């Protein structure tokens, strides 16, 4: 960014906005101009929404989904099937699967996928936390990591690790486009992928 062009406050705002995923310096500048141009209390409400979310949201101590209450509403729902755990990479994948309205089990959020390139090994993910949940009550683990190379690698790793534990392990079906992120997959396709899951070992 050319620091001689923007005032100090503007430069700071653009700098912070451009850290957001998918926001380049041009988009950041556009957003910054929009925010400062608003003469109502929008900038204040935006700032409060951000600080409020940060202050009130935490990770569920059971499934590691993002939540306001711990355990989260899904983990504390007695009406859900606690014998089936759907393993996803990110909290936003839980939202994607919940939108299908087809799944009644619970979740486990890994916090990412295995990626030797980025130095993400099994220790960086919540894998030991998953294993510690596999008590006698759990009958199926659905591996719903993404269908890209990293998601597949993670699914294979987990399948190998879970195999000796005697829990049925399934993988969402290949109806999804290769490399698909769950969050960009429409509800019907995702519901079919869950429905068509196959046992792996
Ligand atoms: Zn939870």
Image (spheres, helix red, strand yellow):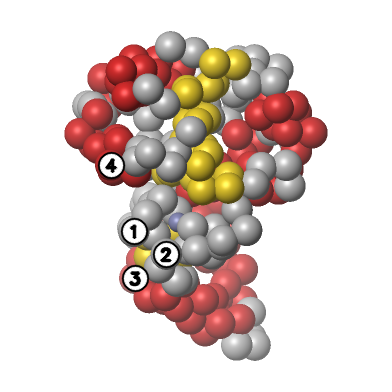
Q: Using the numbered discs, state the Cα–Cα distance from disc 2 to disc 1 in whole angstroms.
A: 6 Å
State the quadrant of the C terminus. top left
User: If you read the primary sequence from the N terminus, does the residue marked by circle 3 or circle 2 appear first?
Assistant: 3
Answer yes or no: disc 1 within 8 Å of ligand 1. yes
Determine whether, in the image, residue 102 is placed left or right of residue 49.
Answer: right
Residue 121 visible in image: yes
Local SS, label 3: helix
Q: Which residue is mark 2?
A: 71
Answer yes or no: disc 2 within 8 Å of ligand 1. yes
Q: Which residue is mark 4?
A: 132
Q: Nearer the viewer, mark 1 or mark 3?
A: 1
Local SS, label 1: loop
Q: Which residue is mark 1?
A: 61
Looking at the image, residue 59 lies above or below residue 155: below
- Residue shown at 34% from the left, 41% from the top: 135
Q: Which mark is residue 8?
A: 3
Q: Quadrant of ligand 1?
A: bottom left
Q: Using the numbered discs, state the Cα–Cα distance from disc 1 to disc 4 in whole angstroms.
A: 12 Å
User: If you read the primary sequence from the N terminus, does the residue marked by circle 4 or circle 2 appear first?
Assistant: 2
Q: Using the numbered discs, state the Cα–Cα distance from disc 4 to disc 3 in whole angstroms.
A: 50 Å
Looking at the image, residue 161 lies above or below residue 122: above
**Snapshot quadrant of residue 4:** bottom left
- Residue 160 in picture, x, y percent from top left: 34, 15
- Residue 125 in picture, x, y percent from top left: 29, 37
Q: Using the numbered discs, state the Cα–Cα distance from disc 3 to disc 2 in whole angstroms.
A: 43 Å
């Amino acid at each position: 960014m050319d620091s001689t062009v923007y005032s100090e406050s503007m430069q700071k705002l653009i700098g912070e906005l451009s850290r957001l995923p998918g926001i380049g310096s041009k988009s950041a500048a556009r957003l910054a101009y929009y925010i400062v141009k608003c003469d109502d209390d929008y900038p204040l409400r935006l700032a409060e929404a951000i600080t409020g979310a940060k202050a009130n949201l935490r990770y569920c101590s059971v499934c590691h989904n993002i939540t306001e209450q711990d355990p989260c509403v899904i983990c504390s729902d007695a009406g859900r099937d606690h014998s089936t755990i759907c393993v996803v990479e990110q909290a936003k994948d839980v939202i994607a699967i919940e939108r299908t309205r087809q799944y009644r089990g619970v979740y486990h959020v890994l916090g990412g996928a295995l990626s030797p390139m980025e130095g993400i090994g099994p220790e960086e993910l919540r894998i030991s936390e998953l294993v510690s949940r596999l008590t006698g009550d759990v009958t199926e683990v659905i591996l719903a990591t993404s269908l890209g190379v990293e998601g597949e690698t993670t699914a294979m790793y987990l399948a190998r690790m879970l195999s000796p534990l005697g829990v049925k392990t399934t993988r969402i079906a290949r109806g999804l486009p290769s490399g698909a992120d769950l969050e960009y997959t429409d509800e019907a396709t995702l519901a079919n992928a869950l429905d068509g899951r196959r046992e792996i070992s």
